[in-house]
Amino acid sequence: MKKLLLLSLALLLASCAPSRVEPTVTTKGFSAFNGLYTKVTSRTLSTPVPKPISVKFDGDWDIQTSYFSLEKNLAFFMCTKEPEHIQFRGMRIDDLYRDATFTVDRNAPEETFIKFYLQWDHDFWTTKQEMMKHGDASSPKYNSEKKYGTIKTVNGAYQRCVLAAVVEDALFMMTGEAVNSDKDICETEAEIWESRESF
């Protein structure tokens, strides 16, 4: 009987663990009034590719998988909490070098690599998005303590921020956009990224 109880407990705990073969979103919260009211207090997005990491959002975020491939080692998620929209994605660094315009030295220091990526990404999208063409852009900044970089564009009430960080041989990126937000979108992305942990 004791073994059966322990087995049941092990299965329950295993069902709560993030999957290592597909992305998962787990929630924490509470119920009241015999289940008539449920409040989600946090959501955790876990992705096995390009590296197995989990990042935390508050419970008001809606998180959708836009693209995921174990074979291509590529993941792309859309995260929304009005008025903020964040694209969270990850890919192998080697795949960036398939683009002939991605010319930073493979052996460059991490700060140099991230700043190059941020400027490269910014320059590409400036030609595609009207709001960015006429916005004021900051130069890429690198947080040497937290090991990530950001670049931001502001155009009136519109703000866009890209955060990038290296995890071993992979690059994780967040592209956030917001209109009429009381919060700096770069701060939102930094809070999410700093919550990360391996699984």
Image: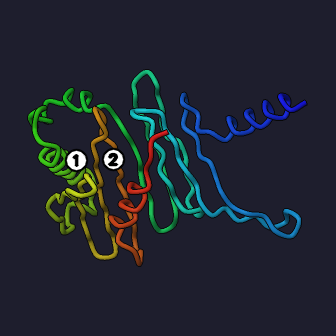
Three-letter code, disc 1? Asp
Residue in the image at 47% along x and 68% along y: 83
Residue in the image at 86% along x and 32% along y: 2
Q: Residue 108: horizontal and vertical position, in percent?
A: 10, 38
**Between 194 and 80, the one nearer to me in the picture:** 194
The label number, if any, that marks residue 108 in the structure image = none
Q: Residue 50's image quarter?
A: top left
Up the image or down, 35 lies above or below 110; here it is below
**Between 196 and 185, the one nearer to me in the picture:** 196
Up the image or down, 35 lies above or below 169; here it is below
Residue in the image at 64% along x and 53% along y: 27
The residue tagged with tag 2: helix, strand or loop? strand
Classify 10 Å Cα crowding around label 2: few (below 14), some (14-19), many (20 and above). many
Q: Earlier in the sequence, mark 2 or mark 1?
A: 1
Q: Residue 169: horizontal and vertical position, in percent?
A: 28, 32
Quadrant of the snapshot with the N terminus: top right
Tags 2 and 1 touching, CB below 8 Å:
yes
Q: Which residue occupies the extreme bottom position in the image? A: 182
Three-letter code, disc 2? Met
Residue in the image at 74% along x and 33% along y: 11
Decide if residue 186 is on the left or right side of residue 22.
left
Front position among marks 2 and 1: 2
Q: Which residue is mark 1?
A: 121
Q: Residue 110's image quarter?
A: top left
Decide if residue 104 is on the left or right side of residue 87.
left
Up the image or down, 95 lies above or below 179; here it is above
Q: Residue 66: horizontal and vertical position, in percent?
A: 49, 41
The residue tagged with tag 1: helix, strand or loop? helix
Q: Which residue is mark 2?
A: 173
Task: Indicate the colouring scheme.
Answer: rainbow
Q: Which residue occupies the extreme top position in the image? A: 71
